[in-house]
Amino acid sequence: MDASYPREERPPPKRGSPPAAPQAPRDHLVWAIFNTLYMNFCCLGFVALAFAVKARDRKVSGDVEAARHFSSKARCYNALATAGSVVLPLLLGALIVTGVIHLSKLAHESVGFFTYQFGGSDDEDQ
């Protein structure tokens, strides 16, 4: 078997990515606007909006480190506002359901108690 055909010699690819310019951080502005308008729990959405605007301003001015810092704070406040707006109604709903169940059991037991106590038979009076 003749394997004398020409082969292409390529150098092996270099490992690792070339150093790139630091990527601009996200400002989370849309998420903050959504939290401010729809789920403003304890004004956390407004605080997140303020930090998102600061992050966008710093990003436009070229201060990447300050933009990253404000972006991190905006993300934290957005997460807190979203979690509070989702968890609190679920917790309130669970408390209402358990309260209704407890009150229905209590009402059922009290009806049994009052019918036994006040609805006795005529044999006990004699």
Image (cartoon, rainbow, N blue to C red):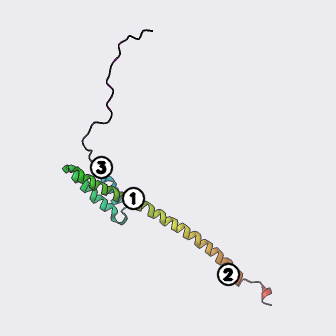
Q: Which quadrant: the N terminus?
A: top left
**In the displayed image of the protein, which residue is found farthest to the bottom?**
126
Q: Which residue is mark 1?
A: 82
Q: Which is more foreground, mark 3 or mark 1? A: 3
* Position in image of residue 33 (x %, y %): 32, 56
Distance of mark 2 from mark 3, alpha carbons?
A: 66 Å
Find numbered disc 2 in the image and state the secondary structure of the residue it sits on. Answer: helix
Residue 39, magenta (yes or no): no
Amino acid type of the residue that numbered disc 3 sits on in the rendered structure: Arg
Q: Which residue is mark 3?
A: 26
Amino acid type of the residue that numbered disc 2 sits on in the rendered structure: Phe
Q: Residue at x 34, y 63 (%)?
A: 44
* Left or right position of 83 against 27: right
* Left or right position of 43 against 106: left
Query: What stretch of residues is rendered in magenta?
Result: 5-14
76 to 22, vertically: above or below: below
* Position in image of residue 92 (x %, y %): 48, 66
Q: Main secondary structure of the magenta part?
A: loop
Q: Give the class, few, some or many, for how many residues have Cα within 10 Å of label 2's Cα (few <14, many ≥20).
A: few
Is residue 56 in view? no
Badges 2 and 3: C-beta atoms under 8 Å apart?
A: no
Give the mark nearer the N terminus: 2 vs 3. Answer: 3
Quadrant location of residue 73? bottom left
Give the mark nearer the N terminus: 3 vs 1. Answer: 3
Give the mark nearer the N terminus: 2 vs 1. Answer: 1
Residue 6, magenta (yes or no): yes
